[in-house]
Image: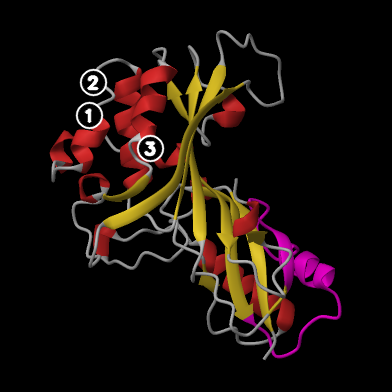
Amino acid sequence: MPKYAIELAYDGTDYCGWQQQLGVGKHANPKASIEEHLVQALRDYSGEEVSSVVSSGRTDAGVHASGQVVHFSLKNPPRENSQLLQGINHRLPSNIQVTKAGLVPDRFRANSSCRKQYSYYFLQGATHLAHLKNQTMRNRYPLDGEPMKEALCDLEGEHDFKSFGSANTTVVSTVRTIHKAELSRFDIPLPGFYDSEEYFMWRVTLVGSGFLKHMVRSIAGTLKQIGENRRPAEDMLRLLSTDARDDVGSTAPASGLWLDRVWYPRQEGIDFLHQWSDLG
């Protein structure tokens, strides 16, 4: 069967994450997953029983994406990629949308040999801004960017990130490689006009081959404390060299976390997706 890949953007506020979280009783999550909506949209569009879709990774409840990559197969492919994109989007909620679609080689797997870029967004300002409340974490107190940048530099390379992962993780290894760790400041995006000294955003960007559950949010929570001068920048390196989960900053809210982009090794047939050679 022909295999397709799509790039997916979504606002995760109203969803339990990429994958349905199974549970019973009062601990069950009643919210639908991104995966459920996509599978149903594919079924409605194609008239086929789409057994599964494979994503580049799972996002948790409340986490957003602008570049999640997913692959699936269809028995009866559309004549044009644009038909697939528009056909799926017509059947998806407005806060989940396909931004790219195309045929890929049968060997392609969305979750294989990829590098992912996550960004965490802090809103600096005296109050929440309505259009960014569910997409950022507001920080009332000023953040000092210099020690935050210094701490981020210590994250680059291969490290054991056990201290930053979820306490109940079941992964075999907690060693991960961070290819890029950066901090940038920029003005508030439209709509509206804001005093750039009073209201602006900090963006923490991490590019890696893999991430532990809650890893980026734990790093963001620790950076927040460093930016507020409540702990030294050197603490980041210390936390990497110890199993000190209780000493890591509070896990930052899911609202500020975005899966921005996924890169793949350059190969014929996936030119519409991001390639490693484009990774600066």
Q: Between 189 and 207, which is closer to the camera in this rendering?
A: 207
- The dot on residue 235 is 1
- Choose mark 2 or mark 1, whichever is in front: 1
Q: Quadrant of residue 104?
A: bottom right
Question: Mark 1 or mark 3: which is in front?
Answer: 1
Image position of 186 (left or right of 88): left
Identity, as a three-letter code, of the amino acid under mark 3: Pro
What is the quadrant of the N terminus in the image?
Answer: bottom right
Residue at the (56%, 57%) spot, across then down: 262
Q: Residue at x 41, y 54 (%)?
A: 60
Q: 10 Å neighbourhood of mark 3: few (<14), some, or many (≥20)?
A: many
Q: Is residue 222 above or below residue 102?
A: above
Q: Kindly identify the residue that appears in the image at 42 percent across and 52 percent down.
A: 61
- Give the residue type that dot 2 points to: Arg
Residue at screen point 43% across, 56% down:
16
Residue 274 x, y percent position in the rendering: 65, 58
Identify the magenta region: 73-102
Is 72 in the magenta? Answer: no
The Cα atoms of the two marked residues, 1 and 3, are separated by: 21 Å
The CA distance from mark 2 to mark 1 is 7 Å
Numbered badge on residue 253:
3
Whole-angstrom CA distance, mark 3 to mark 2, is 20 Å
Labelled pair 3, 2 in contact (Cβ < 8 Å): no
Task: Using a 10 Å C-alpha cutoff, classify the residue at mark 2 as few (fewer than 14 neighbours), some (14 to 19) or many (20 or more).
Answer: some
Eyeballing the image, is 125 above or below 130? above
